[in-house]
Image: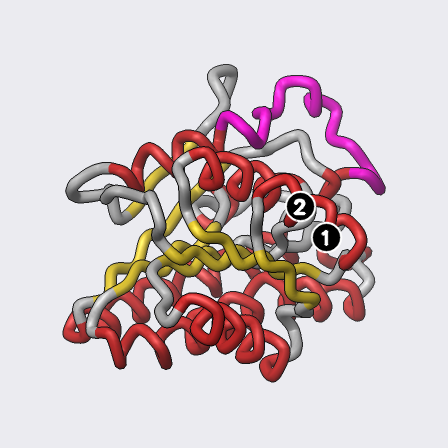
Amino acid sequence: MNLKDKVVVITGASRGLGKALALALAKEGAKLVLGARSKNELDELAKQTDAVAVAADVTREEEVLDLAETAVNKFGRLDIWINNAGMWIPHGLIVSLDMKRVHEMVEVNLFGTIYGSKAALLQMQKQHKGTIVNILSTSALEGRAGSSGYGASKFATLGFTKALVKEAEPEGIHVIAIYPGGMRTHLFDESKPENYQDYMDPAEVAQKIVENLKQEEPEAELIIKRKTA
């Protein structure tokens, strides 16, 4: 896919992988619409990438729909939607986790992806084409002690994604699942894992995602692991 002038929406775009994706896609000449809760950081990134910035909380469906509407009103179509917004809480056994925080994490990781996919589909079905990219995690591929809450949110998102593939395909819409390993991002500001220094640079992960999108037939499931993993 030639990414030049493609209209791309990215959620959770103000930091980490979302920011790295915005910078990488801007270099490819894409037309960007960036969504995040952190409006100040988002506005600064929008200046760097000549993008449209929209304050959007992915746990609020109406705000996600507004994000999609902004893209269509500005550019007339929607080519790629990247469900990137995510949340993580420090590892702990399930008996010790704060269920309120687990619930919030599921809202962001699962429902944020569901709301984003729905908003994208509503437009892409009219076009009979488009690509939805769901940023999952290698935690969606195997259970890990201490990561039951986060793993649950990602396993659920994987289940949704697999169903979405089947629903979107008849409409000519492609769905891509990305499974990155640990990255050095703000997700871990509260508590950094012991091997945090071995985690991947989000710019490296973003570039691999962009290179996949540029293929004539992108991989539908892309696992990106750090070299030491």
Give residue 47's mark: 2
Give residue 69's mark: none
Question: Is 51 colored magenta in this rendering?
Answer: no
Eyeballing the image, is 67 above or below 81?
below
Q: For the residue labelled by badge 2, is the local secondary structure a helix, a strand or a loop?
A: helix
Eyeballing the image, is 126 above or below 223?
below
Q: Where is residue 61? Give x, y as percent.
A: 59, 81
**Which residue has dot 1 on it?**
43
Q: Amino acid at mark 1?
A: Asp
Instruction: Say which of 176 and 131 sits in front.
Output: 131
Q: Amino acid at mark 2?
A: Lys
Eyeballing the image, is 2 above or below 152?
above
Q: Residue at x 43, y 56 (%)?
A: 8
Task: Judge the density around disc 2: few (<14), some (14-19), many (≥20) Cα neighbours within 10 Å.
Answer: few
Q: In this rendering, does residue 146 appear at all?
A: no
Q: Where is residue 216? Give x, y as percent.
A: 16, 41
Q: For the residue labelled by badge 1, is the local secondary structure a helix, a strand or a loop?
A: helix
Query: Which stretch is magenta?
Result: 189-204
Q: Residue at x 68, y 49 (%)?
A: 14
